[in-house]
Structure formats: C-alpha cells, structure tokens
C-alpha cells in the first residue's frame, strides 16, 4: 500500500489496505492533515477491495466525534459494496469511480 498527499486535505491510497501497518500509516497520514488544519478529508482509495476495521473505526471517530466531514472515492466495487453493507455510504460520502 502507498499513500500520497494531494493538497491540504486529500490522500490518494493505492494498493490493498490489509495490514495493521497499513492502518497505522493511514491514521498517521490523516492526523498529519488534521494538524495542518484540514477542515474536511478526501480519501481516494484507488484499487483496494477491502479496508481494515481499524481504519473504518478511525473514520467513524472523525465523522461522529471530531465532526470532520469525510469523503471517500473508491475505485473497486467490492469495497463500495462492503461500505454499503455496513451502512457507511452516507456517513463517509462514498462515491464509486470504476476504471
């Protein structure tokens, strides 16, 4: 998995999100954006078909406790369907953009 920063509030994530290390790396990248004053967060998850529960939990904390608007743009239908099953399409403002 690889994370690239794009602007003051956007992370581009390529590769599959599957390990604890991936989760830690994503959380650190999000925290860095918050410390720089990001008022919302956009995650472009290009090709991962899954997401760890740790990342989902952290995003839920951002939305529900920190009141930080989060948007996800996902490139794999399987991840979109997972988030749909978990009723997270609206809280995370998820959009599917298939290649």
Image: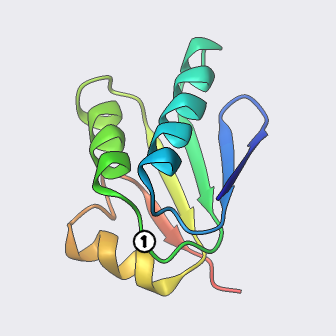
For label 1, the crowd category at 10 Å Cα-Cα, with few meaning under 14, some 14 to 19 and many 20 or more, is some
Quarter of the picture containing the N terminus is bottom right
Residue closer to the observer: 65 or 16 = 16
Please state the horizontal and vertical placement of residue 71, each as a whole percent of the image: 50, 50
Q: Quadrant of residue 97?
A: bottom right
Left or right side of 10 for 88: left
Left or right side of 8 for 47: left
Q: Quadrant of residue 81?
A: bottom left
Residue for point 58% across, 13% down: 35
Q: Quadrant of residue 98?
A: bottom right
Residue for point 20% across, 68% down: 86
Quarter of the picture containing the C terminus is bottom right
Q: Is residue 18 above or below residue 54?
A: below
Q: Is residue 35 above or below residue 66?
A: above
Residue closer to the observer: 61 or 26 = 26
Please state the horizontal and vertical placement of residue 19, each as a whole percent of the image: 45, 57
Please state the horizontal and vertical placement of residue 31, each as a whole percent of the image: 52, 24
Residue for point 51% across, 69% down: 95
Please state the horizontal and vertical placement of residue 85, each as a whole percent of the image: 22, 76
Judging by the rendered image, the residue that carries numbered circle 1 is 50
């Amino acid at each position: 998995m690889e994370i690239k920063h794009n602007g003051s509030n956007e992370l581009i994530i390529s590769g599959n999100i599957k390990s604890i290390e991936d989760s830690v790396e994503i959380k650190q990248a999000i925290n860095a954006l918050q410390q720089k004053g990001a008022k919302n967060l956009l995650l472009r998850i290009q090709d991962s078909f899954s997401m760890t529960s740790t990342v989902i939990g952290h995003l839920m904390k951002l939305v529900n406790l920190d009141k930080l608007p989060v948007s996800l743009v996902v490139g794999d239908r399987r991840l979109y369907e997972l988030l749909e099953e978990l009723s997270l399409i609206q809280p995370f403002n998820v959009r599917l953009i298939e290649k």
